[in-house]
Image (cartoon, rainbow, N blue to C red):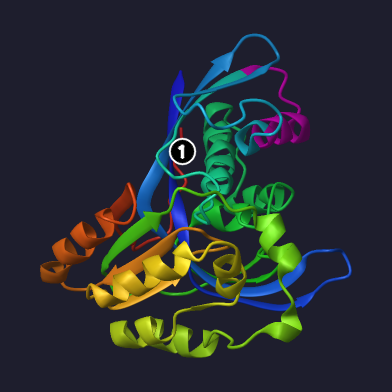
Amino acid sequence: MKIYEKAPAKINLSLDVLRKREDGYHEVEMIMTMVDLADRLEMEELPRDTIIISSQAGYIPLDEKNLAFQAAKLVKDRCGVDKGVYIHLDKRIPVSAGLAGGSTDAAATLRGLNRLWRLGLTDDELRLMAEELGSDVPFCVTGGTAIARGRGEKLEPIPAPPPCWVVLVKPPINVSTADVYGRFRVNEIKRRPQTQAMIQAIERGDFAGVCASLGNVLEDVTISLHPEVRYIKEAMLRLGADGALMSGSGPTVFALVQKESKLARVYNGLRGFCREVHVVRLLPAPLEQKRT
């Protein structure tokens, strides 16, 4: 039997860093939501006790460094599964882009193996396992829209933002999240995101309010390393986007566009800056765990 799982990308509508914790992580407050740019995972049980990962993408690790591999090993170890699994990753989400590509693959692996091996794990149990894999993985287990606190694992679901188009632009550079956080200094923050204003705008269905409340404290750090992030953001707004922001630690920048009449101008203008430009929609609802 083969199992298929969709692994959508996430964007940060806001990202605030409150302090550095004693455990080395940073205390964050973020609002995350998912878009319909997604990797697709195919999983098949193997008779021997092994984990095999393949992908059409030639730029990702296929061994223990891969988060999907780590997720599969965690499931096997935690649930006492002595069978193996073959996982094929059909990559569509850019790598090292601030879109949680590896994290959402890991979350999809947890969901898929729960079905493949009929483990009966609840969403809460999957999220607890996900905490061991990375800060964004718990959110990616169920997706939707949520406030994430702690190091990203404390989740509070909120309504979806007003529907709109999302234009994602990934410049031809990779950004290390660890490097960006390593250079980040809480006492050097120039402006903090308006997290509460963003929550209120979402709850009111106020698209203009959502755009006005976009904010990411990591943006200045990444821009200092890669000025093209600023150029892309400024180009988006100049072309008529309603709002623009860098997602996560970057370098992907997204534009929010409510009216389809503006979309072609924004998209075509940005194609002159970068090859990787994607037009997607927000995913309005959390992911439902399929039952097999």
Relative to 60, does residue 124 appear above or below in the rendering?
below
Main secondary structure of the magenta stretch: helix
Relative to 110, does residue 140 appear above or below in the rendering?
below
Looking at the image, which residue is at 73% across and 80% down?
Answer: 186
Among all residues in the image, which is located at the extreme right? 22
Q: Choose top left, top right, bottom left or bottom right for residue 135.
A: bottom right
Left/right placement of residue 90 relative to residue 183 reads left
Residue 273, given in percent of the width and then of the height, sits at 32, 56
In the image, which residues are magenta? 70-84
Instruction: Name the residue that disc number 1 marks.
Output: 291
Q: Secondary structure at mark 1?
A: loop
Does the magenta-highlighted stretch encompass residue 161?
no
Relative to 245, does residue 138 appear above or below in the rendering?
above
Residue 264, given in percent of the width and then of the height, sits at 15, 61
Looking at the image, which residue is at 75% across and 69% down?
Answer: 26
> Can residue 156 be seen here?
no
**Toward the viewer: 42 or 194?**
194
> Can residue 148 be seen here?
yes
**Toward the viewer: 216 or 134?**
216
Crowd around label 1: few <14 · some 14–19 · many ≥20 (10 Å): few
Relative to 209, does residue 14 appear above or below in the rendering?
above
Looking at the image, which residue is at 71% across and 56% down?
Answer: 178
Left/right placement of residue 114 relative to residue 1 reads right
Residue 167, given in percent of the width and then of the height, sits at 30, 61
Q: Amino acid at mark 1?
A: Arg
**Toward the viewer: 243 or 199?**
243
**Toward the viewer: 203 or 274?**
274
Left/right placement of residue 160 relative to residue 242 reads right
Does the magenta-highlighted stretch encompass residue 74?
yes
